[in-house]
Amino acid sequence: MITEIVIIKLPPGFTPEQVIANFEKTAVTWGENPDLVRKYYLLDREKGIAGGVYLWKEKAHAEKWHGAEFRKRVKELYGAEPESQFFETPVIVDNVVGEIVKA
């Protein structure tokens, strides 16, 4: 599996309420994504940073869903280009379901 961290530097004046409203608007779409295992929305109010942590089945899925169209949509919603980092995720500890997953 692949973990992708997406960071968006918010423009001045963008409120936490606006960010959270955008999160809520997009959550249903991500919940229907067949290639996404899990997503966490991120917000650092003090630093003016928003983003997400995505757990994908494969890096190709991240690249497929976070291509030019995604980048354009993020810029329209937040006024800034997203930055992505990718990490191989060989072991996952899930305390909610009580299991350790080895990818």
Image: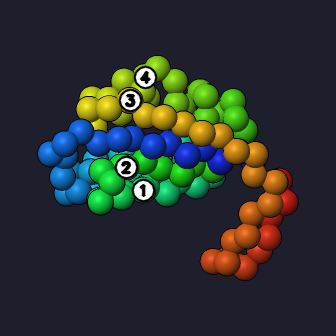
Q: Earlier in the sequence, mark 2 or mark 1?
A: 1
SS assignment at label 2? strand
Q: Is residue 49 left or right of residue 66?
A: left
Question: Residue 24: x and y, percent?
Answer: 31, 54
Tell me: residue 69, above or below residue 25.
above
**Who comes first in sequence, dot 3 or dot 2?**
2
Residue at the spot of label 3: 81
Characterize the local packing of mark 2: few (<14), some (14-19) or many (20 or more) Cα atoms within 10 angstroms. Answer: many
Residue at screen point 54% across, 36% down: 84
- Residue 76, label in figure: none
Residue 36 position, x and y percent, is: 60, 46
Quadrant location of residue 4?
top right
Comes first in the chain, label 4 or label 1:
1
* Mark 1 nearby-residue class (10 Å; few <14, some 14–19, many ≥20): some
Residue at the extreme front: 47
Q: Earlier in the sequence, mark 3 or mark 4?
A: 4
Residue to which mark 2 is pinned: 50
**The quadrant where residue 34 appears:** top right
Q: Which residue is mark 1?
A: 42
Percent of width and height locating residue 103: 83, 53
